[in-house]
Image (tube, rainbow, N blue to C red):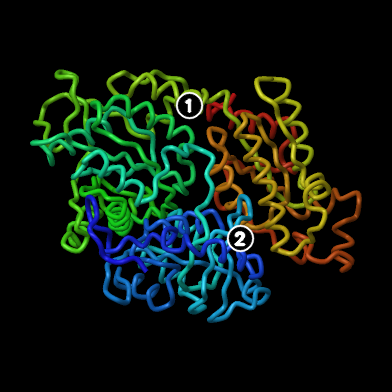
Amino acid sequence: MPQLRRYAGNPPHGGVLKDLLARDEFIADELRQEADSLPDIVLTERQLCDLELLTNGGFSPLEGFMNKADYESVVDNLRLVDGVLFPMPITLDVSQESIDSLAIKPGSRIALRDPRDDEPLAIITVEDLYKPDQVKEAIQVFGADDPAHPAVAYLRNKVHPFYIGGKVQAIQAPTHFDYVALRYTPAELRSHFKKLAWRKVVAFQTRNPMHRAHRELTVRAARQRQAASLPNVLIHPVVGLTKPGDVDAFTRVRVYQSIMEKYPNGMGHLALLPLAMRMAGPREAVWHAIIRKNFGATHFIVGRDHAGPGKNSQGKDFYGPYDAQELVTKYHDELQIEMIPFQQMSYIPATDEYQPADEIPKGVETLDISGTELRRRLKTGAPIPDWFSYDAVVKTLRESYPARNKQGFVLFLTGLYNSGKRNIARALQVTLNEQGGRSVTLLLGETVRQELSAELGWSREDRHTNTQRIAFVSAELTRAGAGVIAAPIAPHEVSREAARQTVVSTGGAGGNFFLIHVATPLEYCEKRDRKGIYAKARRGEIKGFTGVDDPYEAPQKEDLTVDVSTQSIPEIVHSIVLLLETNGLL
């Protein structure tokens, strides 16, 4: 066990950097051999991020995934059982199936494997196995049990119902192939600061591309705190899981590399953080401060609506603009990292400079470009002025985000069997191919069933799996600029919404998803059923048939509703083409 010692820069949270990789280095070979004989869990992407920061000390003072007592204390009080401040539950979720098949119980040792290469990364000794109140977790940690919050949606749709608590022993760090030189553990970054004699370090958290305002903000923040000596800035962007729809990490890192050239020589340093964000606003800000403290930062910039996810289901912001700053201030004495609060930076044309909005006198002309406006300009090819960003940054963004009419899209047609989806999809593909400009792929329900999902049945779970496979393939194609027409029955709202999230979050610039409800009435579908499939279902020869003994859930968030009983196929195709044109995709 590491002993308390003096650290360069800010001491770690809790006084000791829990670098489990260093602690377990001399028994790593023994642990690796043991892992080969143990039951194992292949981690999810979020679990992988969490484990990396657990084993390298980024989550100090944690030494593993939270047991029930620590979890409940953190959810209720933002503290571990021993009283140490920690605002975010760090949990290892498992299914009942895994519990049964792996015989998980207190005392079990389980290998934790990297989902990318199946390598063993750590061994957890199970302390307890518990079923959390995930609704309470959503309300306490994120402020509401509202699926409009990305972490709540993740909790509802992807997190298993049981949590494993227990300390871990580290075998090795995950292997990364991208931007290896920019990846530092807390110990490595602290050593870097010591080598450069950086006694004070201002850390800047971001999950978005940086522009001129961000550069001015960070330089100003550092100089305010170190007027008598060289100011030092740590640009510490998140490259783990962020908000669905965010700019991809590769593009963002290229932007950060361009921005670093704009800092005074020797002032800034770029390091990547493999964090899976929860977008938890105030709690997340406290968590970010703890993490940056563990990496050696002495100061931390907390901006307006820090780590906020945007609007809730009622169209209101989840958190107040300064809630995060207020919570970090409340715990200042325990955090022992100096918060630098900053408001929005605005450009003043008269002096060609950026100033905090609250310091600009009334009546002075200012210019701003919102994130929404920037995305619009990127998608449409509209100019981005020099005062807002740098040429190198804009060039990088335009390479990854082509003009709107060059981006991919997904047209997801859902409806009953024999509702006309297939005929609409085929006619639509012909029309789009005639127009040209991009390849158009057709994913018909029966084709996908044959080629991708032949082993699946017709249970709710199997239908969901089939829909997610379609979404995965669609996202891969649309990210490459293709148009995709998918036409499954997809009878359940949760599956359709999950498909939308998959395309939006992983489709890059092509994450344009349109849900089209082919709302042809059941009676019409049955009447025109020349194959007699509905008749077989009515006689009980086919079980679980949508519309007969399995209900079809009408979409709640459709972008267009069509009906072949009242509209011709050409009329419907024209309405869909108009939808694409209205959104700038044709």
In the picture, which quadrant includes the N terminus? bottom left
Residue 44 locus on image (x, y percent): 56, 57
CA gap, disc 2 and disc 1: 38 Å
Left or right of 176 in this view: 362: left
Residue 319 visible in the displayed image: no
Above or below, 529 relative to 344: below
How far across and how far down the image is residue 176, in percent?
52, 44
Q: Write the residue at 20% across / 62% down.
A: 331
Q: In screen coordinates, is 135 left or right of 477?
A: left
Residue at x-position 43% and y-position 77%:
68
Foreground: disc 2 or disc 1:
2
Instruction: Give neighbour class at mark 2: few <14, some 14-19, many 20+ (Cα, 10 Å).
Output: some
Would residue 134 be found to the left or right of residue 224 on screen?
A: right
Q: Pick whichever, 193 or 276, lies toward us.
A: 193
Query: Residue drawn 24% across and 47% down?
Result: 302
The residue type indicated by label 1 comes to Lys
Residue at left offset 56%, top offset 42%:
506
The answer to which image quadrant residue 19 occupies is bottom left
Determine the image quadrant of residue 455: bottom right
Q: Amino acid at mark 2?
A: Val
Q: Which mark is residue 42?
A: 2
- For residue 379, the mark is 1
Label 2 SS: strand
Residue 202 placement (x, y as % from top left)? 23, 43
Point out the residue furthest to the bottom here: 106
Please determine whether, in this image, residue 475 is positioned above or below residue 25.
above
Q: Position of residue 157 (x, y in %)?
A: 55, 60
Q: Residues within 10 Å of mark 1 (few under 14, many from 20)?
A: many
Q: Are marks 2 and 1 in contact (CB under 8 Å)?
A: no
